[in-house]
Image: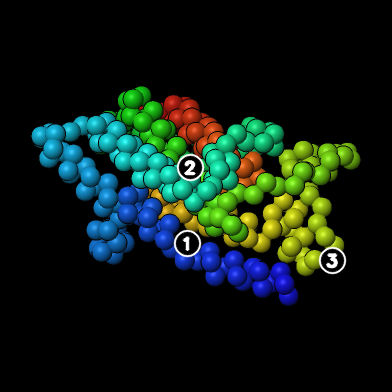
């Protein structure tokens, strides 16, 4: 009964926080298109669009390039998606590690390569749905290297805010906890491999099946809620993307939030995200999409 009550209390606290963060993300990252209602499309991304208009008027630019626009958007994202939330969290007394900005633990570095291998099929299908090189040149979709680097840089505030700060605020005491030591890597075959991955962690046999299942993954109820919430927010910022990218953003977001929680750092998940983008680019080269 105590665990059920604590989980319900976590849910009551979690829901309004999820709504607040969703509105915050939508205000400057949103790019919702058809068939979303008109008022949603008008609201989504209004902060970035408004600041961009002010910048254009102040600088007296009549026709800015897409690269120029992307650079301005990156600056706004770094300020509103990283600097402001980090300052707020620091004023609340949170340490760098408690919001995922510290160095990862050994487990975090260990799973980076494994997670990139898991991302391989997603990268292929993301590349497959892109236009061909001829179509890209005709529609203006083709991007020079400078734009691609700016796009990769824009993923930094995305991870700081969503997979770090948001997940931390969803957790009890609004901070990433210091997790207990992993169970020893022992046994042979499958069990040893799972323990090396940080899975197959022992659970209390007296607890319910769901609690033992979460413990197997190194989680508890509030942590699972926080990771699911981070996945939802990660999906929200990808609304408007192509179908495969959008469909993979929620499970992919949950995966990077899980890595952040277990490693206590956003950087392993960010490296996996960048690795997937690089793999997608390589597949695009092989498929003639660039």
Q: Secondary structure at mark 3?
A: loop
Residue under the point 36% across and 31% down: 150
Visible in this render: residue 269? no
Which disc number belongs to residue 206?
3
Residue under the point 48% across and 42% down: 159
Image quadrant containing the C terminus: top left
Task: Report the residue marked by disc 1.
Answer: 17
Residue 263 image offset from top left, x and y in percent: 64, 41
Residue under the point 17% across and 43% down: 54
In terms of sequence position, does the residue under pointer 3 or pointer 1 come before the other?
Answer: 1
In this view, 45 is above or below 20? above
Which of the two residues, 69 or 121, is positioned nearer the viewer here?
A: 69
In terms of sequence position, does the residue under pointer 3 or pointer 2 come before the other?
Answer: 2
Residue 165 image offset from top left, x and y in percent: 50, 48
Evaluate if marks 2 and 1 touch, with contact meaning CB atoms under 8 Å apart.
no
| Corner quadrant of residue 87 | top left
Task: Report the residue marked by disc 2.
Answer: 159
Visible in this render: residue 76? yes
């Amino acid at each position: 009964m105590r665990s059920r009550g604590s989980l319900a209390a976590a849910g009551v606290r979690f829901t309004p926080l999820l709504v607040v963060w969703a509105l915050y993300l939508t205000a400057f990252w949103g790019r919702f298109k058809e068939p979303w209602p008109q008022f949603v499309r008008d609201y989504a991304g209004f902060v970035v669009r408004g600041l961009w208009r002010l910048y254009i008027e102040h600088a007296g630019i009549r026709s800015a390039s897409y690269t120029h626009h992307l650079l301005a958007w990156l600056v706004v994202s770094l300020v509103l998606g990283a600097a402001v939330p980090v300052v707020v969290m620091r004023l609340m007394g949170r340490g760098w590690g408690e919001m995922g900005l510290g160095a990862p633990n050994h487990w975090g570095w260990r799973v980076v390569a494994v997670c990139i291998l898991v991302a391989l099929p997603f990268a292929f299908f993301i590349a497959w749905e892109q236009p061909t090189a001829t179509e890209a040149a005709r529609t203006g979709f083709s991007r020079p290297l400078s734009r691609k680097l700016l796009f990769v840089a824009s993923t930094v505030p995305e991870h700081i805010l969503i997979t770090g700060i948001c997940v931390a605020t969803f957790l009890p005491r609004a901070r990433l906890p210091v997790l207990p030591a992993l169970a020893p890597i022992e046994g042979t075959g499958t069990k040893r491999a799972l323990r090396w991955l940080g899975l197959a962690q022992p659970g209390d046999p007296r607890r319910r099946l769901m609690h033992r299942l979460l413990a197997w993954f190194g989680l508890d109820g509030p942590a699972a809620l926080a990771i699911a919430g981070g996945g939802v927010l990660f999906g929200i910022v990808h609304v408007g993307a192509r179908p495969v990218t959008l469909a993979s953003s929620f499970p992919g977001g949950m995966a990077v939030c899980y890595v952040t929680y277990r490693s206590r750092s956003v950087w392993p998940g960010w490296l996996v995200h960048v690795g997937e983008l690089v793999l997608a680019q390589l597949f695009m080269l092989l498929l003639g999409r660039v």
